[in-house]
Image (cartoon, rainbow, N blue to C red):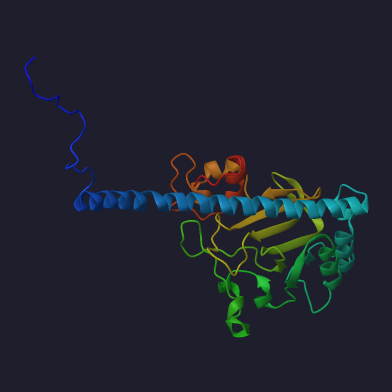
Amino acid sequence: MSGGGRQSLEPSNNKRFGFTLAEVLITLGIIGVVAALTLPTLIQKYQKQVWVNQLKKSVSTFENGFKMMLADAGTDDLLNTEFWQKLQEQANGNEDFQYSCEYATADNLTANDEILKKYFKILSIGGNGEDISCYFDYRNADLESIKDPEDLYAYKQLNKARLVMPITVGARNIQMADGTTAGLQAVAYAQQHPVYGDVVAVLAIDINGKNKGPNQLGRDAFSFYVTRKGVLMPSRNYESLKATPVLCGNIETGDINNAMGIGCEARIIHDGWKMNY
């Protein structure tokens, strides 16, 4: 072959590779749009899991406390424990008597308060016949008796509408050391529940405290029955939720537009401790 040097296969040093400013800006814009679309969903999913974990912890805390009551009394029936025996003593045969705001005076439930503090880490217990110290929906309060605006809390439904019915009106307000706010109504004598049999209390739980939002049924506020064996049972069973979408949404379609948020704890537990709504 006649003269002439070999052609270099290496790229010329004069050529530069990279993105133009316009290309970078377009890429960043696309990333921003994707983030805007996905981040809210991820944040919501994370928040739901936080609520579920808090709920699971609260259920465990109360059930463990009731188990310790049973163990100390050497029984498997809460009615035979110190707390319920004291409540029956206070009742003096009155089958309607309860551990609640309605039946509380300045000191007649103090002994019961002290018993609870032996089994649960409690900061304070309120509800000596005064509306503002109870765990309630504010529309049922005598507004003229309100002394502290911090004691007014309106809970919302799952669909974020104003709650159309009060939650656990008259329950004794219990502020737990972990930030949970609970409302407890305990009956002196067991009452019959159509599904769960004998129950001895109703327990409402705001898993992150009533001072912290969203104060919404089915998100951070739930209700349970307490059986004589100290087990917490959802305020509604799963079958009733399926048959009545207004309670915790339409389980088949996922629609919660008309849902009140009542009984959602049953749905969470049924779904393996997941908030799939």
Residue 199 vertical position relative to residue 175 in the rendered view, above or below? above
Which quadrant holds the N terminus?
top left
Residue 176 can be seen in this image: yes
Q: In which image quadrant can residue 213 be found?
A: bottom right
Give residue 162's position: percent from left, percent from top. 48, 65
**Seen from this angle, which residue lies furthest top?**
1
Viewer-side residue, 220 vs 140: 220
Residue 93 can be seen in this image: no
Viewer-side residue, 121 vs 224: 121
Left or right: 130, with 253 as reference point:
right
**Seen from this angle, which residue lies furthest right?**
74
Left or right: 205, with 99 as reference point:
left
The residue positioned 72% from the left and 63% from the top of the image is 184
Viewer-side residue, 8 vs 63: 8
The residue positioned 21% from the left and 53% from the top of the image is 21
Give residue 179's position: percent from left, percent from top. 66, 65
Q: In which image quadrant can residue 146 be found?
A: bottom right
